[in-house]
Image: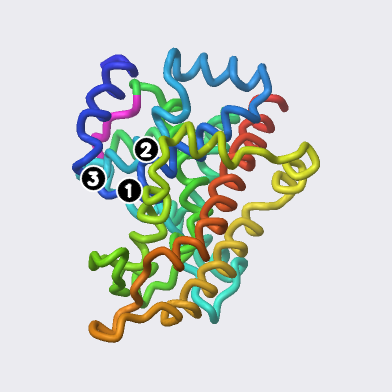
């Protein structure tokens, strides 16, 4: 199936699934990224994707969650770092297992594939073949690029660097403008969607960094990205009951919560897009 036909069929089914960052969140990250790519990087990406844009493939790793053949990637969308653990401890634990266990390892794998590392490429292709999964556009590189775009977005969503006891906030019930949901969903999509903007409008409104600010964001490591999410994650937990409904006893979020937190969401989306661009420029401009 041609890549364009595949993406068209996926777009027809966007309402069926639940997305990390929400579908528009990942598109915002990809759109911001596009604006910070070098011409050489854009040319290399066009060679991989053809006429498709990064925003069109950004949600593909979520679309395929409905396909059991891709179940082996489910744990790639998040990492678990509890308060009694460090980033390095988690990495050391995962080294004992040859499998790809989380978003951090998956990001490294996709980066290596796009850099044409033969061992990484063979490892991924063997996994795909073993599970009878179908690659995006029948291309290993296109598949790796889609995962890289998506997972860098995920690692910047603070509750995707979660605590295992509550599944990254999925077990914490809250109310959002009167509707019962959970804190993870609020941060995945509700805050973004409440702004009533298209992904291109949202990206345009927040993508106003100076060259110095871009360079600063891009100077940080993958470990830094995860640590930033942990700091914000703890802020989210510590302020949950600043907004409590007397009748239900649940954290109840509305206009004040939106006002207090939209800037954090915008910053994480912006950082993800700029850093994704920095990584892709590094990959394709060695």
Q: Quadrant of the C terminus?
A: top right
Residue at (42%, 48%) from the top-left corner? Answer: 195
Asked if 249 appears above or below 24 in the picture, the reply is below
Residue denoted by label 2: 59
Q: Are marks 1 and 3 in contact (CB under 8 Å)?
A: yes
State yes or no: residue 132 in magenta. yes
Residue, disc 1: 19
Taking the image as shown, residue 182 lies to the left or right of residue 50, namely left
For the N terminus, the quadrant is top left
Q: State the predominant SS element of the stretch in magenta.
A: loop
Q: Which residue is mark 3?
A: 17
Label 2: element kind: loop
Residue drawn where x is 60% and y is 30% of the image? 115
Residue 99 appears in the figure: no
Label 3 sits on a secondary structure element that is loop
Identify which residue is drawn at 55% across, 30% down. Answer: 114
Q: Position of residue 163 (x, y in %)?
A: 43, 72
- Which residue is found at the position 59% from the left and 19% from the top? 42
Q: Which residues are magenta?
A: 131-136
- The residues bearing labels 3 and 2 have C-alpha atoms spaced at a distance of 10 Å
**x and y percentages locating residue 282 in the rendered image:** 69, 32
| CA separation in Å, label 1 and label 3 | 6 Å
Q: Give whichever of discs 2 and 1 has the lower sequence position.
A: 1
């Amino acid at each position: 199936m041609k890549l364009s036909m595949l993406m068209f069929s996926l777009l027809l089914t966007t309402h069926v699934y639940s997305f990390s960052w929400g579908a528009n969140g990942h598109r915002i990250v990809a759109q911001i990224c596009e604006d910070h790519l070098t011409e050489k990087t854009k040319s290399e990406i066009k060679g991989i994707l053809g006429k498709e844009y990064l925003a069109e493939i950004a949600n593909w790793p979520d679309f395929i969650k409905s396909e059991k053949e891709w179940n082996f990637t489910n744990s790639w969308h998040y990492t678990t770092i509890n308060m009694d653990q460090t980033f390095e401890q988690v990495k050391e634990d995962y080294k004992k297992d040859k499998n790809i266990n989380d978003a951090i390892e998956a990001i490294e794998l996709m980066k290596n594939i796009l850099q044409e590392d033969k061992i990484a490429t063979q490892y991924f292709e063997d996994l795909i073949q073993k599970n009878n999964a179908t690659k995006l556009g029948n291309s290993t590189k296109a598949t790796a690029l889609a995962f890289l775009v998506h997972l860098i977005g995920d690692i910047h969503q603070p509750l995707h660097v979660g605590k295992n006891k509550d599944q990254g906030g999925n077990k914490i019930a809250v109310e959002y403008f009167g509707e019962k949901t959970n804190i993870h969903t609020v941060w995945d999509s509700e805050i973004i969607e409440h702004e009533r903007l298209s992904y291109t409008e949202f990206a345009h409104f927040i993508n106003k960094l100076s060259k110095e600010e871009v360079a600063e964001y891009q100077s940080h490591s993958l470990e830094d990205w995860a640590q930033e999410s942990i700091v914000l994650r703890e802020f989210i937990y510590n302020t949950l009951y600043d907004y409590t409904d007397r009748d239900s006893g649940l954290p109840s979020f509305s206009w004040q919560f939106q006002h207090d937190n939209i800037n954090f969401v915008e910053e994480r989306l912006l950082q993800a897009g700029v850093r994704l661009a920095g990584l892709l420029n590094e990959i394709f401009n060695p």
